[in-house]
Structure formats: structure tokens, C-alpha cells
Image: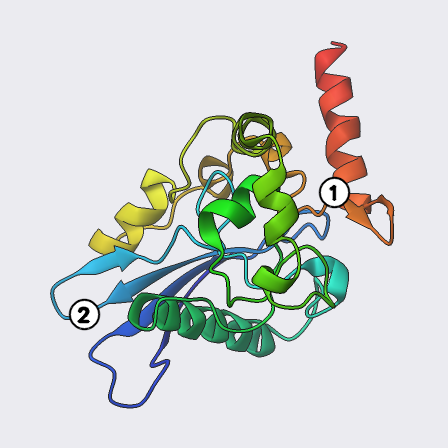
Amino acid sequence: MWLAVDSAVLSGLDRKAAFLIAVPFRHFQPIRAWAFWATAVSRTWIGPRHTNAVDGSICAFNPSEGTWKVGGDLVALIDQYTMWVFCQLHLEVIGWWPGKQTADFIYERLTELKHNEWCGCRPDAGRYAECCKKSDLAADRFQAAMQFVGGFLKFKPRKPPVSVSRLICEGGEPPVFTRARPDPMLFVGSCLFPAKVDGKLSGSAAWIMQRFDQTRNR
């Protein structure tokens, strides 16, 4: 099922956020959503900060923290998306990301986090400058980049599928759900399929790894 929802974000803002949300009927698949700034004459994708590899979908929270769970209230989920858009607006206008965030990779922290932002290494982390910045700067940059870009993003930039962008910009019939879904193996470790929960392999990641093994052994 596809949902199209608009959010004013802030009173008096000269644009609104337009969400396109893909809600699967199978609970082992994650809900995915994309956000675009919408005016009377344009639609502009909101990202790439805190979007998922590789399809540029919204990464508004870490599922392992229980902020929202599959089967929960969709209005509450859209509220989370709206707060995410507000943070994107703050980043655009003020220059840094407000509030807690998840950033597990050294390269991600070095290239995206400002010194006064909350470090994303763990939920109770302090400011980046006081937490991981010193050790991140001392790390092997090439190895860190390969871990993030080579192992996680598969050398592909984050951006919405063409079918999603076309629907937001031009309207018409929504795409077939599977055509807007890249290889799920690319999502292991993202906020859609967290690799671990409480130190153990998450159920969603285990399901994907099992599916990958079955495909590889055919």
C-alpha cells in the first residue's frame, strides 16, 4: 500500500514536506518512506543526510531503540518523519543536526558530523568533539572509507528510485512495490534492517542473510 502525505512542518514556512510511504502487508518487510520539499513549482528530494543506503529512504530513528515498531500507529510514524524533516531544515539553515542520531561508522562521522552535534556511536553519547572525534581522526581513513562505502553503500550514491521520484514529481499510478525495492542485502546495517539488537543479530538481518544464502546456494 502506498500513502501520500503532506506536512506543513512549521507555520509560515514557504514550502511543505511531501511524504511518499510504502507500507508492505508482510511484517518482515520494513515500511519505507521518502520525503521531498514541495512548492507550487518544484519537488526536491530531502537528503542524503540520515537516509538509507542505497534508495535514499528516510532514516528517522533506530528501530533497535523502540521508537516505533511495525504495526504501530501510522500517525505517530508520520510525526517522527516530520521531526526528521525539521532536523533537515535545521541542518540546511543553521548548519548542524540537532538532537540524538545514529552514526556507527567512523567515515560517516568524519564526513557528516559537526563537532557540536551529538555523536552517533551509542544512544548515551555526548557531543562529537568530546566523544569519538579524536579517535576517529586517528583512525586509518582509507580503511574507514572502505568499510563504509565499499561494504555498506556498495559504491552507489543514496537517491530515491526513479519510480518514486517520478510519482512525486509527475503523479500517476504508484509503482509496483517490488520495483521500488533494491536488493535487501544492501540494507543490512541500515535503520531499515539493523544488523544487531542488544548485541545479537537482529531478526530482520538474520532473515535477509538466510535468504541470501539460499539464493547463493541455488
What amino acid type is highlighted by mark number 2? Answer: Thr
Q: Residue at x 60, y 26 (%)?
A: 143
Q: Is residue 1 above or below residue 123?
A: above
Q: Can residue 4 be seen from the camera position used here?
A: yes
- Can you tell which quarter of the image residue 87 is in? bottom left
Residue in front for this viewpoint, 103 or 82: 103
Q: Residue furthest top?
A: 218
Which image quarter holds the C terminus?
A: top right
- Spatial CA distance of label 1 from label 2 is 37 Å
- Residue 45 in picture, x, y percent from top left: 31, 55
Q: Nearer the viewer, mark 1 or mark 2?
A: 1
Label at residue 63: none
Please name the residue that numbered disc 1 is placed on. 195
Crowd around label 1: few <14 · some 14–19 · many ≥20 (10 Å): some
- Residue 98 in picture, x, y percent from top left: 49, 73
> Which label's residue is closer to the chain start, 1 or 2?
2
Q: Is residue 62 left or right of residue 66?
A: left
Q: Secondary structure at mark 2?
A: loop
- Residue 31 in picture, x, y percent from top left: 59, 55
Please name the residue that numbered disc 2 is placed on. 39
- Can you tell which quarter of the image residue 142 is in? top right
- Can you tell which quarter of the image residue 214 is in? top right
Q: Is residue 97 above or below residue 143?
A: below
Q: Residue at x 38, y 67 (%)?
A: 91
- Residue 102 in picture, x, y percent from top left: 62, 57
Crowd around label 2: few <14 · some 14–19 · many ≥20 (10 Å): few
